Each structure stands twice: as structure tokens, then as C-alpha cells.
Amino acid sequence: MLTTRLSIAFFMGFSAFCFSQIDRYTYKSELNGVTNSWHKIVVPKTVFGKVKSDFSDIRIYGITPKNDTIEAPYVFNILSEKLINTKVAFNIINTTKSEKGTYFTLQLDTEGSINEINLNFATQNFDWKLDLEGSQNQQDWFSVLEDYRILSIKNTTTDFKFTKLVFNEAKYRFFRVLIKDESDPKFRSAQLLSRSIIAGNGVDYSIKSSTIIEDKNNRQTVINLELNDAVPLSHLGMSVSQTFDYYRPLKIEYRSDSIQTEKGGRYQYKTITNGVLNSLEANSFKLFNTIAKHLKITVFNGDNQPLTITGFNVKGYEHQLTARFIKNADYILVYGNELDRQPSYDIKKFVTKIPKELTALTVKNEIEITKTKVRKIAPLFENDFWLWGIIGVVILVLGGFTLKMLKKA
């Protein structure tokens, strides 16, 4: 009887341990289409608002035909674009001044192409136009950029500099810059780059609602954006209708929490980044893969009239799991556990052996996990009378031995 009860208790305890692995999570989604050892899983956008910010509470479990629970290892990847910058060596071979302005000529050490030049000047406040030309022999010059604007503003409230020349790939041995200004630009140095981009898998997220409030008292424009889901954001683009030059500092925040006060609920925000809304370059701001559903953008107008902001573009990158499946099982994706830690799988050390071409699994509708209640094993003696009876028997036996020992004495 005792052996049978112990066996049942062991079996139920083992089963509870297997299923408790899944019960530790809040949500699950069925995975369909496992036919090979390796597959990729595109993380659905509905998942991001229910996982930790480092995505450490995502697991892939399988239930085998024998009702065993197994865990499938995976590698987590954010398919962002990769920027490759190659510095190109050069020498400054000539600096001259004419009625047009100041020229300085750069000679590349080796033949190659470039598409970006970063300039550095000792002068801190300027607003200049420049021309950029290329040549193979310093006799015939060809236009690369014309009337290109560079700007620097530095004072007690502002520190902004735009001295980056961006152009289509150009292959010349010599490059000549003309600063169209009478003053001495106090040229310090330059950096020549060959910049290439390996495209990632970008995702455009739709905006559910937007509001723009002109705060005249604080001389600010406050913009609130709401997305359909909490998703990982990488870029925010803004369109401005004005054609004149403008320069407006801004702050981008996301809603992190809400608190109750005497005056009711109040939202709390955390800053993602600070930047400048300006007419010199594309108004696209990096959001550093922040998971958010609500964004707040504050444009500081100062003494200027507010800008007319006509549109927004919110982007992120595809998040992908590359998983290995070695057993026949029904697999599910589980997530939502604040106490979980980052998993440690061997396959992370052998990513070069993962096949390049992978079939994507289908992630079915999300289901909230119902916590399994393990049935309590009944105690060996449910009735107190049994316990008292055994105690009485023990007392009688001990008393009998005591009487026998006294008679012998």
C-alpha cells in the first residue's frame, strides 16, 4: 500500500515538473510546419508588449507522443541593417585662397571610391556654402556637390554641427573643396569614408492616432503618437511642410508607466533620444530598438513660429528566432515571465553551421496559459484516529517490555 502511494506520488510529481516548465509562462502560441531540423520563426508583433525588454523569457517547448516535455534551442537575431565604414587614407596637398573663397585639395593614397567626407574646422559658428569637385590629374575637374550647405551653431543653449558631405559614390584620385566665404575657415582636418549598407528586414508600423498640441506658454509643440501594439522601434521620421530654413531641438520619449495621484491618473515618460529637427538633412531619428506603444515628441520652438508637421513614419526591424528541432513533438512558443533569465544554448557557439536558407514556421493565435493545479497527494493516514491508535499500540508495546524487565529484576 505504501509502495503504491509512493509510486503514484513520484509519477504525479514528475508530470507536474514537466508541465510546470510551461506553466511558468503567461502566453503560448502553437508552431506549425516543423519538417526539418532547422527553422526560423518571425516573432509576431503582438508578442513584444508581453515579454521582457531583453527578450530573455522566450522559450520553445515540445510535447512528445510519450507526453515528455522537451526544449528546442534557438538563436535570437534582430535583422537590422549593417553599416560598413571604410576609412580612406589621403593627404592634404594644397590650400589656397581666391576671390571665390578658400580651396583645399585632398589626394587619396590609393585608387578607390568614396561617398562621404567629414570636415572639421576650428571656427565654431558659421553658415557656409561649398562646392566639391573630383579629378584624376588636377587639370580636369568634375562637379560632385554644388552649393552644399554646412553649418555650426555653438552657444550657451545650443551645440549643433552639420559638416558631413554625403554624395553618390565617386572614384577620383583628387578631391577639391571650395568654401565660399571671405573669412578664414580655419580648416583642421577631414575624414574620407567609403560607406556601404547591408540592408536589414525593416518593418513599417502603422500609427493608430496622433495629436499635435501647440503649447504657447512654454513655446513648445507637443506631439503624441499611439501605435496599434507595443513594438520594438528603431526609427522615427517626421515631415515638415516649411521650405525655409529651420533649426528646432526636440526630445523623443515613450510612455513607461502610469501612476495614480490625487488629481487622477498620470502617465510617466522616459527619454529615448534628443535631436534637432532641421532643414539641412532628413529628419529621421534613431530610437535604439525601444519597445513602445505611445511616443511623445516635444519640439522646442523658442521665439519662432511653430512648424507645420505633416506626417510621421515609424519603423522597426524584424526579430527572428533560428531554432533546432531534433525530436518529433508538438511545439509551442511560450513567453511572459518576469523572473526568467537568458537561456544558454550550445548552438550559439556554432552559428556558422546553421543553414542559410530556412523555412519559416507558422505562429498560430496566442492563448493565455491556464495554470495547472497539481492534485494534492492524500496523506498516508487521513483519519486522526489511526494516528492515535498507532501511538496507543506503541505505548502498550513499550509498557509490556518495561513490565517484563521489572519482573526479571
Image (cartoon, rainbow, N blue to C red):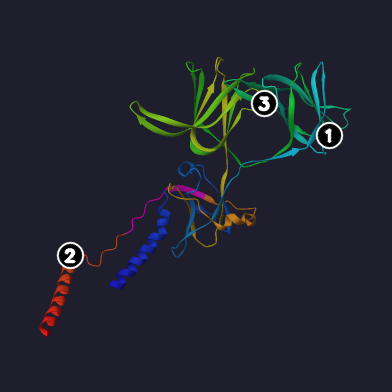
Alpha-carbon distance for marks 1 and 2? 99 Å
* Span of residues in magenta: 363-374
Please name the amino acid that badge 1 sits on.
Arg
Question: In the depicted view, which residue is nearer to us: 404 or 47?
Answer: 404
Quarter of the image for residue 164 reads top right
The disc placed on residue 253 is none
Q: Secondary structure at mark 3?
A: strand
Alpha-carbon distance for marks 3 and 1? 25 Å
Residue 272: % across, % down: 53, 33
Q: Nearer the viewer, mark 1 or mark 2?
A: 1
The disc placed on residue 173 is 1
Image point 53% across, 50% down: which residue?
A: 362
**Left or right for 124, reference 315:** right
Image point 29% across, 60% down: which residue?
A: 376
Disc 1 + disc 2, Cβ < 8 Å? no
The residue at the far bottom in this view is 408
**Left or right for 377, reference 52:** left
| Quadrant (top left, top right, bottom left, bottom right) of the N terminus | bottom left
Please give the residue where the numbered disc 3 appears in the rendered image: 162
Q: Nearer the viewer, mark 3 or mark 2?
A: 3
| Quadrant (top left, top right, bottom left, bottom right) of the C terminus | bottom left
Disc 3 + disc 2, Cβ < 8 Å? no
Residue 259: % across, % down: 38, 32
Please name the amino acid that badge 3 sits on.
Phe
Q: Secondary structure at mark 2?
A: helix
Question: In the depicted view, which residue is nearer to us: 345 or 108?
Answer: 108
The disc placed on residue 384 is 2
* Residue 165 vertical placement versus 343 (above, below): above
